[in-house]
Image (spheres, helix red, strand yellow):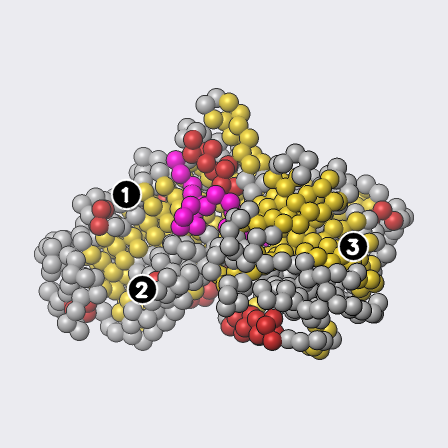
Amino acid sequence: MRRISGNISILLTFIMLFMLFAGFGTVNVGAMEIYDFASLNNNVTVQASDKIYNFSALTESSYATKKADVKVFDDEVTLTAIENSTPVSVNFSADSPDGGEIKLTSALKSKTLAATVTVGAGETLFAFYGGTDSGGIAAKAVGMTITDTATGNTVATESNTENTEAKPYVISYKSENGGTYKVADSTASNNRTLLYALVVTENSSYNPTFTGSGSNPSSTSDPSDTSSPESSETPTLPPKASIDPNTVSNIQLLNAKGWLETAYVTWTNDVAVEKYNVYYKGESDSEYTKLDDELVRYYGSYYRADALGLKAGNYTLKVAAVIGGEETDSKETDTITVVPHTREGFCFDSRSPYYNADGVGGYKNDGTVKDGAQIIYIDNNNKDTVKHTVMVGGKATEGIGLVNILSLREKNNAETTPLIIRMIGQVEAPNGVNTSQYVQIKATSNITFEGVGDDATTYHWSFLVRDSKNIEIRNLAVMEFYDDGISLDTNNFNCWVHNCDIFYGQNRGGDQVKGDGSLDVKGGSSWITFSYNHFWDSGKTSLCGMKDDIGTEFFVTYHHNWFDHSDSRHPRVRAGTVHIYNNYYDGVAKYGAGSTTGSNLFVESNYYRNTKYPVLISMQGSDIAGGVGTFSGEDGGMIKMYGNKIIGGNTVVNAKDEPTEFDAYIADTRDEQVPSSYTAKQGGTPYNNFDTAKDMYDYSPDSAESVPERVMTYAGRMESGDFFY
C-alpha cells in the first residue's frame, strides 16, 4: 500500500528497532519467519523449506543478522544451502521461483569494511548495508562505493548522512561485460559500517525487492523487472529468455486520470512480457506520441506511466506490450482531461527585466516542452552517475552526476539552453551536496526541476538557488532537510515554486525543532511566485526578506498555498511588496502574514480557519497586545486586506476603527486605495497601493469561500502525493 500514515510509519520503525536488538532464534510474525544467525561460526543447519526475509543491520558485538524494518526477498524464495563459516563471511545460494539462480554473499564485519565480488556479463550487484552508533540508533554508513578492481574506477556511489535513523540502505551496479568489484565504505573512518548482503542476479527475471526508504525503480531498468520501490507484492514472472513469442498478453487497465499538464495510466498483466511502450494522443492529433521509457515504472503489483508536458485538453493514453521485439497487445484509455497550471503573480509580470515570454524554466506557457529543451532523468540509483553534456568555454563537457551537471551549468553562466530535470521516486542526498545538504542551482537560467508522478521526494537534502533566472521547481516533496527546504537565496529573478509538499526539516533544536525555513526568499531575489504548495505542520514557513533587504524593493506573490497547521511566517516580510491571495490558513498556531520594516502586503480573498492571528504588523495592534512584539522590535510595514474569510482565531483590528493600533486597513472594495494618512506606528511607512496601479499584473482570484476546496484539491504533489496523515 503506497499511501502510508506518518505516525504508523514511525511506530513501525520503533517496533523493528526493538526486534533488531532483542530478537532471538526464530520469531513468527504473521506468516513471516525471522532468523537469528548469531552463531554462524558454529555448525548451523538451515532447512531447504526455510525462507529468507532480510539480512539487516548487525550488532557490533555479535555480528548477528536479525530482522529490520523491511523484507528483501519474496515470500517464495527459499534457502537451499549454507556453508559453515565464521562471522566475518559466509556464502550461500538460493533458487528463485522461476528457476533462475540468485547468488548471495554476506560479509559481516563492523568498522571499516570491504568485500570483493565477481559478477558475470549483464549481472547486477546489489549491496544492502547499514550501521549504528554505540547505542544502536544512528546510521553511520556515510560513503559506500562500488569500484571496478581492474580499472580502479568508481562505478557507483551512495552518500548518506550521519546521525539519522538506523535503517537499511542499498547500492547497486549492473555490469555490462562482467568483472570483479569491490564494495567498501569510502570514508575509511571509525564509522560502524556493516555490509550485510551482496546479491547478484543471474539468468532470472526476479530481482531482490528492497522496500526501505530511499529505494526506487531504476530509470534505466526494464519495466518488466520485478524490483519494487514501494510494494512487497512481487509477481512471479518467467525468465525473459524463455518468453514464448506466441505468448498472449493480457493487459488490464486499472486507472487513468488527467492532472495539471500531466496524465497517467496504471495497469497490470498476469503474463510476462519484455517491456511496455506507452503513448499519448490529443483529441486533435492524428498519431500517438511515445513516452520516454523512464516514465514507465513498476510498483510491485502494478505498472504506471506518466505523460508530462501536456497542454490543457482531452487525451487518450495507450499501453502496448512488447514480446519478441514486437507490440502484440495494446489497450487504450477512455478520454481523460488535462487542466492547465495557473501562471499568475509577479513571476509572470512583464515588468521584470528578466521576464521570459516563452515561459519559466523548461516549459512553455501552454505547458509543453520548450523548443530545443534538454531532458534528463534522475533516481536514487543514477543520481551520481547520470550523464549530460554542457558547453563550457565553447567545449562540450560531460557532466557525471546531478551535482556535477549543475556545477557545469554554473561554470558556463551564459548557458541558457532550457533544461528539464525529472526526478523519479525518493532520492537520498547525492554526492557533492554542500555542508548544509543543498543541491545548488547557481548562476544559470531556464531550468525546471520536477517530480514524476505522485511520489518524488528529496530526502536529507534540499535546494539552494542563487544568482539564477527563470527557475521552476514543482511536484516534489522535500523531507528531512538540514537547513531550508527550498531557499531562493541571493539575486534570483522570475522563479516559480509550486505544487510541492514541504515536510519537517531535521531537528536542530531551539526554534529549528521542525527545521529552519520551509520556503524562503531573500538576498535581493524578486519577481517570484509561490503557488499551490502544501506546508505540513511547518515551523518557520516562509521568510520573505532578510535585514540586508531593508531599503530595497522586491516583488513576491503567494497564492493558493495550504498552510496546514503550521506555526508562523506565512510569510514574514521585510521591505518587499507582496501579494497574498487565495491561500488556505488551516489551524495556524501563531500568525498568518507579518509585515515589518516598510513592507507592503495586499492580503486578498484568503480563508482563515482557526488561525490565531490572521495578520500582524510589527510593534502595533495585536502584535503588542501582550506587551511583547512578535517581530523583535523591528519597524512596522503596511497591510491592506480585502475579501477574506475568517473563522475562529482573533479578529483583525481595522485601521478605520483604530487608526494607530491597527492590524490592517480593511478595504470595502478591491480597488479602494489606502489613504496616505494611515502609516505604520513604528517607522511611519505608508501603503504604496501597488495593487491598484495601472500596470498591476492580471490575475483571477477565487472567492474566499471556495478556497479550501480548490487548495485541498490541487496543492502539493499530483493528487495530494503519496503521504497522508
Magenta stretch bounds: 423-443
Q: Please give the residue where the numbered disc 3 appears in the rendered image.
A: 102
Nearer the observer, 75 or 688: 75
Q: Is the C-beta separation of discs 1 and 2 under 8 Å? A: no
Nearer the observer, 442 or 97: 97
Q: Please give the residue where the numbered disc 1 appears in the rendered image.
A: 524
Q: Position of residue 359 (x, y in %)?
A: 44, 39
Q: Which type of secondary structure does the marked residue at label 3 adopt? A: strand
Q: Which type of secondary structure does the marked residue at label 2 adopt? A: helix
Q: Which type of secondary structure does the marked residue at label 1 adopt? A: loop
Tag in front: 1 or 2: 2
Q: Quadrant of residue 444?
A: top left
What number is the disc on residue 511? 2
Residue type marked 1: Gly
Q: Is the C-beta separation of discs 1 and 3 under 8 Å? A: no
Crowding at dot 1, Cα within 10 Å, few <14 / some 14-19 / many 20+, comes out as many
Image vertical order of residue 622 relative to residue 314, above or below: below
Q: Position of residue 679 (x, y in %)?
A: 12, 57
Q: Position of residue 718 (x, y in %)?
A: 54, 57
Q: Quadrant of residue 20?
A: bottom right
Residue 436 among those drawn in magenta: yes
Real-space Cα separation, disc 3 to disc 2, in angstroms? 50 Å
Crowding at dot 2, Cα within 10 Å, few <14 / some 14-19 / many 20+, comes out as few
Q: Is residue 264 visible?
A: no
Residue at horizontal 73 percent and vertical 73 percent from the top: 33
642 relative position to 217: left or right: left
